Image (cartoon, rainbow, N blue to C red):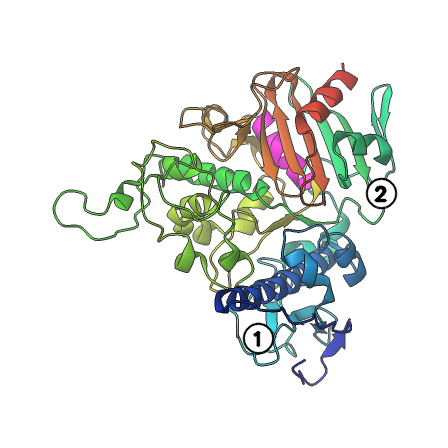
């Protein structure tokens, strides 16, 4: 492993390297792919160790490298799952104890993969493959913003019980759900947190219940994965409400023009992007975006440049790049008002939207937040875009935004049990679930279910193994029945 020397820097958490046996009779392409997989695995590991630990510490919570290895770094996609935990790593801290960066060895002839921590405003980013070790002067203290200060244990969002110890049981009316009961909704499911809230007619909180698995509590952030797309949709809604944007705005890619519209990508609107209907090509189902997430590439380098193969607005194709394009369209609004301030306004004060190393928001997946902050997101939609401002009730989303995001007005997924709105999934066809139910879904079992007709929001967090399917429709149905 490359030697890192900094005056006063604390190095921690070294694990032994286990060298895999060389593959026999690999083709040149297979050797290339194997090398790239190692680079991605190292980037994945560096970023998760950095984000899970540093973002938790900023909240006043604690995560250990061992807990990250046991949860976030197990049950992930092949082939990374087979090699990621064996990789040698180092956590480098500043004299203050704050994480400076995490580095992971992946090749003898290349620098380690680096994930620096930029503070509690934007968390960690993964540097490009081959980036030299630490460009960010770890001997200098990073500024602490928001959640890292003395207010870390005070009220964030709409509720904060004084006792923040994890609870082993979720009590809903006469029904109690423990970990064993939660596992019945998906074999191999690993539920880490559940929050259920119901608002009264006057939109004040009437009921709340919470569950946290051992090692997790109300201050523990987890990666949202694709629940971030619903957060992105909400931030776009705030930009629309400000009057600075419309969902009919073209995104402004400004490709070539030669009479008329020129490049068809110039016709893509914010609405097309939110509804996964840009008509652009993506190379894998779900458009995994590995170069941005783990490779150290940027949003501008990868998300905006895919070619159009269908007329925008004509075909549904789930793609991370579409959400990243919608966020790009309102980037000036987000930079001016700042994402941390906008999220704090709606009660999400313990949420960190991470960026690529050039500052592009990775709002398709790379957000770290608590279960309570996600419940506050759901509450915002129960209240139809209203919050309690300093001078009384204040609108932060357009009056019709809830109807807009939960309407299947664009092309729909084929062969799936759920429809799609604008950054939110639709549960209108789920048996026993009210037809107005819509939800945010994320990898590894992240869910935020909003049921306007019942004034209920349900949050389920997990670290489910790859291939595990948590039955969110059945869980929603049972939670609602228990509250009758």
Residue plotted at (61% across, 75% down): 107
Task: Give percent across and percent down for residue 18.
Answer: 74, 71
Dominant SS type (magenta): helix
**x, y percent for residue 186:** 74, 33
Compared to residue 343, the image places residue 127 above or below, namely below
Residue stretch rendered in magenta on the structure:
372-382
Under circle 2, the secondary element is loop
Disc number for residue 331: none
Residue named by callout 2: 166
Where disc 1 sits, the SS reads loop
Q: Nearer the viewer, residue 390 or 94?
A: 94
Q: Is 367 contained in the magenta span?
A: no
Query: From the viewer's perspective, is residue 71 above or below residue 162?
Result: below
Horizontal arrangement in the rendering, residue 313 relative to residue 294 (left or right): left
Q: Position of residue 175 (x, y in %)?
A: 85, 21
Residue 81 seen by the camera: yes
Q: Quadrant of the C terminus?
A: top right
The residue pinned by badge 1 equals 136
Q: Looking at this view, name the residue that lies furthest to the left.
A: 259
Q: Nearer the viewer, residue 248 or 475?
A: 475
**Residue 106 appears at what percent x and percent y?**
63, 72
Name the one closer to the observer, 187 or 335: 187
């Amino acid at each position: 492993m490359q030697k890192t020397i900094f005056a006063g820097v604390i190095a921690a958490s070294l694990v032994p390297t286990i060298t895999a046996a060389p593959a026999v009779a690999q083709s040149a392409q297979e050797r290339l792919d194997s090398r790239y997989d190692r680079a991605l695995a190292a980037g994945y590991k560096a970023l998760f160790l950095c984000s899970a630990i540093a973002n938790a510490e900023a909240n006043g919570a604690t995560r250990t490298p061992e807990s990250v290895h046991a949860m976030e770094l197990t049950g992930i996609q092949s082939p990374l799952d087979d090699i990621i935990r064996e990789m040698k790593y180092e956590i480098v801290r500043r004299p203050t104890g704050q994480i400076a960066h995490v580095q992971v060895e992946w090749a003898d002839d290349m620098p380690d993969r680096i994930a620096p921590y930029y503070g509690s405003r934007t968390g960690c980013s993964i540097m490009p493959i081959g980036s030299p070790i630490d460009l960010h002067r770890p001997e200098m203290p990073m500024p602490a913003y928001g959640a890292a200060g003395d207010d870390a244990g005070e009220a964030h969002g709409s509720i904060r019980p004084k006792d923040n110890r994890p609870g082993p049981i979720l009590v809903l009316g006469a029904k109690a759900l423990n970990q064993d009961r939660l596992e019945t909704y998906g074999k191999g499911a690993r539920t880490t947190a559940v929050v259920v809230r119901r608002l009264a007619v006057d939109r004040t909180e009437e009921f709340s219940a919470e569950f946290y698995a051992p090692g997790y509590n109300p201050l523990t952030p987890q990666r949202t994965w694709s629940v971030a797309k619903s957060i992105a949709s909400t931030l776009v809604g705030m930009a629309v409400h400000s009057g600075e944007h419309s969902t009919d705005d073209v995104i402004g890619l400004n490709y070539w023009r030669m009479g008329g519209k020129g490049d068809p990508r110039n016709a893509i609107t914010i609405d097309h992007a939110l509804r996964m209907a840009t008509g652009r090509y993506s190379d894998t189902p779900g458009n995994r975006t590995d170069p941005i997430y783990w490779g150290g590439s940027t949003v501008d380098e990868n998300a905006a440049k895919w070619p159009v193969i269908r007329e925008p607005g004509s075909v549904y194709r789930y793609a991370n790049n579409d959400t990243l394009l919608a966020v790009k369209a309102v980037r000036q609004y987000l930079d001016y008002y700042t994402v941390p301030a906008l999220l704090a306004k709606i009660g999400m004060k313990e949420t960190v939207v991470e960026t690529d190393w050039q500052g592009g928001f990775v709002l398709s997946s790379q957000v770290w937040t608590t279960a309570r902050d996600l419940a506050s997101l759901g509450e915002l939609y129960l209240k139809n875009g209203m919050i309690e401002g300093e001078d009384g009730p204040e609108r932060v989303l357009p009056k019709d935004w809830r109807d807009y995001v939960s309407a299947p007005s664009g092309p729909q997924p084929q062969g799936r049990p759920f429809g799609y709105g604008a950054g939110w999934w639709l549960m209108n066809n789920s048996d026993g679930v009210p037809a107005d139910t819509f939800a945010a879904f994320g990898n590894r079992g992240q869910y935020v279910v909003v049921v306007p007709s019942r004034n209920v929001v349900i949050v389920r967090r997990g670290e489910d193994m790859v291939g595990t399917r948590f039955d969110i429709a059945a869980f929603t149905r049972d939670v609602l029945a228990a509250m009758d």
